[in-house]
Image (cartoon, rainbow, N blue to C red):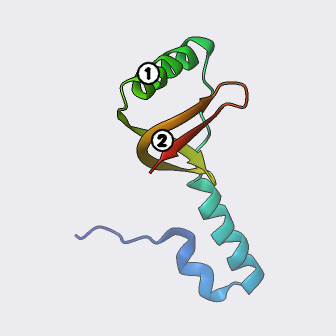
Amino acid sequence: MGQLNDRGTKKWTSLMMPEHIQLLNQMWKEKEYKEKPILDEQKMQDINAQLQLAIHNNLTVNIKNNANRDYETIAGKLLKIDSLDKQIQLNE
């Protein structure tokens, strides 16, 4: 016998009110959100050392950023590191 092709709650959406469908879509979207990692002091020092090395040697870096509950990667050369505001400036 073949496998059962169960579509879960999606198979019932034709019988639901539009408001319920909207809430289910929002729930599915939120389920895929990526949590922003919490960095300890040691990890932040390691990252800072790598950034300082990259700026002094004019290296291209790949920065992985958590934006809008998802990750995006930006590549470029570092122009400025602002430790107080915890911001960096890239020449993309």
> Which amino acid type corresponds to the residue marked 2 in the rendered image?
Lys
The x and y percentages for residue 19 are: 77, 80
The residue lying furthest to the right in this view is: 19
The residue lying furthest to the left in this view is: 1
Quarter assignment of residue 68: bottom right
| Towards the viewer: 32 or 81 | 81
The x and y percentages for residue 40 are: 61, 17
> Which amino acid type corresponds to the residue marked 1 in the rendered image?
Gln
The x and y percentages for residue 47 are: 50, 22
Q: Which residue is mark 2?
A: 64
Work out how far the residue at label 2 is from the one at label 1, CA to CA, in angstroms.
Answer: 14 Å
Q: Residue at x 61, y 82 (%)?
A: 13
In the image, residue 55 above or below residue 45? below
**Residue 59 falls left or right of residue 2:** right
Q: Quadrant of the N terminus?
A: bottom left
Q: Residue at x 37, y 72 (%)?
A: 5
| Towards the viewer: 1 or 15 | 15
The answer to whether residue 20 shows anywhere in this view is yes
The residue lying furthest to the top in this view is: 42
The x and y percentages for residue 51 are: 47, 25
| Towards the viewer: 63 or 36 | 63
> Which of the labelled discs sits on residue 24, or is there none?
none
Q: Secondary structure at mark 2?
A: strand
Q: Secondary structure at mark 1?
A: helix
Q: Residue at x 65, y 87 (%)?
A: 15
Q: Which residue is mark 1?
A: 50
Instruction: Determine crowd level at label 2: few under 14, some 14-19, many 20+ residues with C-alpha closer than 10 A.
Output: few
Mark 2 / mark 1, whichever is N-terminal: 1
**Residue 14 falls left or right of residue 57:** right
The answer to whether residue 17 shows anywhere in this view is no
